[in-house]
């Protein structure tokens, strides 16, 4: 059950240009959110903007939680101005989240741009940290993370990636870091070189719609299972306004209630 609560900002740090990491301390105990779930934040105490803004869980810290966000317009600009000690009304956790199965084989995590926000939390749920591995806790089938951004300066969470036993495969549109070009083409080349990974593999993805659409087309063609977290515009976040409906092969679905994570082959783009 999601609920409305007050959260106190304990940190709101600019990471790179236009990108921030906010840590929130809920007033009471909240239900533990899973990777891919989200929160609606009231970024202003007045009426402008009127609607709460949705943000994916980035990291759960036991009681506090973190969100990673990029400033896009007025709401996120106001959020970036919040300081330690400020309070916000928050609704959540909301949505279904990624269907995490630790024993799943050949997991491929795919993030585009700010889509890395929920993917890091998912990676941390799936991959033991290096310290665990050193103590002999290594498990064999580690996920592969594909992460695309426009340019080197927009690659986020590099320290987090380093602390996981996970070599990310990075691409940038301008070739300033990692492979040059879009990440879906990089995935195609990777799977051509590693055909054994195609069998029993599953994608978990979050990123811009063109990336998810291209990934979906590829996955369906090669019969690869996958799940995508969608980021439609949202008004209520609780399934009543129908503002976030998408078309799927199982009919119209509300991203805030039945999603935001959908089987990639069911989404009608
Ligand atoms: C389930 C969900 C999870 C999300 N998680 C994150 C996250 O972890 N980090 C993050 O930075 N952002 C996330 N977003 C997107 C974020 O909610 C929007 O960027 C934010 O609401 C924009 O508010 P604003 O007032 O700053 O911009 P507005 O003034 O409302 O809009 C500015 C620009 O951003 C575009 N925009 C607004 N909302 C969305 C949206 N939902 N999807 C795509 N474009 C949008 C508008 O079309 C416009 O061009 C998520 C969205 C959803 C639905
Ligand atoms: S945002 Fe209102 S139904 Fe989803």
Image (cartoon, grey):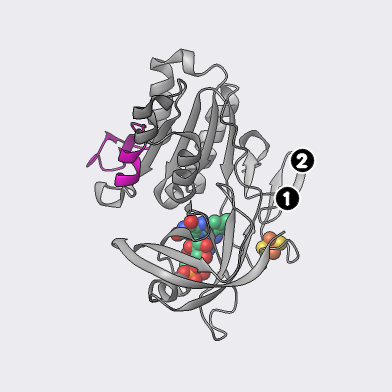
Residue 32 in magenta stretch? no
Q: Is residue 118 left or right of residue 227?
A: left
Q: Nearer the viewer, residue 80 or 74?
A: 80
In the rendered image, which quarter is residue 137 located in? top left
Q: Is residue 110 left or right of residue 236?
A: left
Image coordinates for residue 203, horizontal then vertical, percent: 53, 32
Q: Mark 2: which secondary structure? A: loop
The single residue placed furthest to the left in the displayed view is 176
Q: Report, in whole angstroms, how far the alpha carbon at label 1 lies from the one at label 2.
A: 8 Å
Q: Nearer the viewer, residue 19 or 232?
A: 19
Q: Nearer the viewer, residue 191 or 185?
A: 191
Whether residue 243 is visible: no
The residue tagged 1 is: 253
Image coordinates for residue 129, horizontal then vertical, percent: 39, 36
The residue tagged 2 is: 250
**Above or below: residue 219 compared with residue 211:** above
Q: Is residue 27 left or right of residue 14?
A: right
- Which quadrant of the frame does ligand 2 lie within? bottom right
Report the residue at 57% width, 19% height from top. 200
Residue 179 in magenta stretch? yes
Category of crowding for the residue at label 2, using alpha-carbon neighbours closer than 10 angstroms: few (below 14), some (14–19), many (at least 20): few
**Above or below: residue 31 compared with residue 190:** below
Report the residue at 60% width, 42% height from top. 98
Whether residue 159 is visible: yes
The single residue placed furthest to the bottom in the displayed view is 46
Category of crowding for the residue at label 1, using alpha-carbon neighbours closer than 10 angstroms: few (below 14), some (14–19), many (at least 20): many
Magenta residues, as a range? 158-182
Q: Nearer the viewer, residue 199 or 180?
A: 199
The answer to whether mark 1 and mark 2 are in CB contact below 8 A is yes
Image coordinates for residue 204, horizontal then vertical, percent: 53, 37
**Number of numbered callouts drawn:** 2
**Above or below: residue 92 compared with residue 150:** below
């Amino acid at each position: 059950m999601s609920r409305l609560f007050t959260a106190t900002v304990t940190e709101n740090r600019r990471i790179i240009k236009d990108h921030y990491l906010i840590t929130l301390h809920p007033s009471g105990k909240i239900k533990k959110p899973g990777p891919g779930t989200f929160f609606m934040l009231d970024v202003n105490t007045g009426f402008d903007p009127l609607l709460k803004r949705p943000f994916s869980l980035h990291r759960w810290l036991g009681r506090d939680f973190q969100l990673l966000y990029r400033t896009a317009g007025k709401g996120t600009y106001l959020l970036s101005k919040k300081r330690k000690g400020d309070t916000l009304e928050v609704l959540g956790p909301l949505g279904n989240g990624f269907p995490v199965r630790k024993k799943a084989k050949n997991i491929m995590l795919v993030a585009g741009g700010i889509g890395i926000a929920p993917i890091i939390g998912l990676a941390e749920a799936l991959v033991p940290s290096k310290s665990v591995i050193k103590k002999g806790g290594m498990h064999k089938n580690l996920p592969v993370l594909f992460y695309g951004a426009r340019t080197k300066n927009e690659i986020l969470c590099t320290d987090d990636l380093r602390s996981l036993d996970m070599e990310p495969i990075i691409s940038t549109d301008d070739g300033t870091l990692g492979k040059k070009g879009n990440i879906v083409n990089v995935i195609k080349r990777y799977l051509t070189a590693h055909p054994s990974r195609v069998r029993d593999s599953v994608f978990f993805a979050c990123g811009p719609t063109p990336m998810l659409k291209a990934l979906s087309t590829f996955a369906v063609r090669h019969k690869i299972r996958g799940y995508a977290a969608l980021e439609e515009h949202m008004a209520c976040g609780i399934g009543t306004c129908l503002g976030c409906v998408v078309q799927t092969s199982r009919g119209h679905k509300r991203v805030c209630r039945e999603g935001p994570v959908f089987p990639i082959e069911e989404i009608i783009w």
